[in-house]
Image: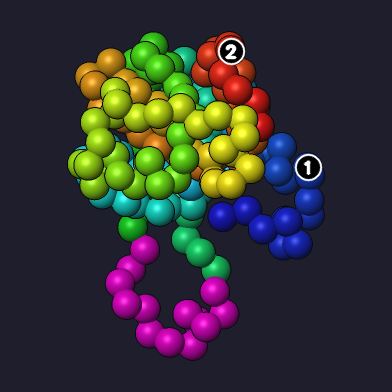
Amino acid sequence: MLRPRETGGEQDLASFWRGVGERRGGEVAFYSFATFVGRAGGGPAGLSGLLYRVGGRFWFEDFERENWLLRILPPRRPFAKTEIGFDLEAVTAVKVVSRATAYRCLRGGVAPGSTAALGRVARLFTTPVMQLTLADGSALFFEVMREREFLAATSTPGLPAR
């Protein structure tokens, strides 16, 4: 993974995103740090990584966490990279829900179509999670650092801003 102190800063960050665009076949139009909370009915994932858009497709990639304590102790299991991709055209709805609602949906307690959108006042008391409902009826949940830019990248006007 890219480490600014080892690579020299912004110039290398730009080349990193250029490389990602070349690998995915286009230019990176949006990117943010994000946590993939999980897929509806699939249980919680809790993977930190990068969420980005290249052309009409979104990608999420997790990365191995650096931890000085893990360098001393033997690893419990080797790191397995996770990549998730989905087409923008497959996204039928985007809404902001509470983290608790997302976890209920992940565990199968609430159907993706029955989740309640988070209001402006409620955002003060809980962590907002983006729910992306896909054409096949499934839903993906992400905590996105650059929420407004993400909503713009999904072309979803009218959603409450944080």
How far apart marks 2 and 1 lie (CA) works out to 36 Å
Q: Amino acid at mark 1?
A: Gln
Task: Of the two numbered discs 2 and 1 on the same chain, state the one appearing first in sequence.
Answer: 1
Q: Is residue 138 or residue 158 the one in the foreground?
A: 158
Whether residue 23 appears in this view of the structure is no
Query: x and y percent of residue 81 in the render?
Result: 37, 52
Figure quadrant of the N terminus: bottom right
Q: Residues within 10 Å of mark 2 (few under 14, many from 20)?
A: few
In the picture of the structure, the residue carrying the numbered disc 1 is 11
Q: Nearer the viewer, mark 2 or mark 1?
A: 2
Left or right: residue 86 versus residue 54 is left
Left or right: residue 111 versus residue 75 is left
Q: Amino acid at mark 2?
A: Gly
**What SS does tag 1 mark?**
helix
Q: Which mark is residue 158?
A: 2
Magenta segment: 67-79
Q: Is residue 76 above or below residue 108?
A: below
Q: Residue at x 79, y 44 (%)?
A: 10
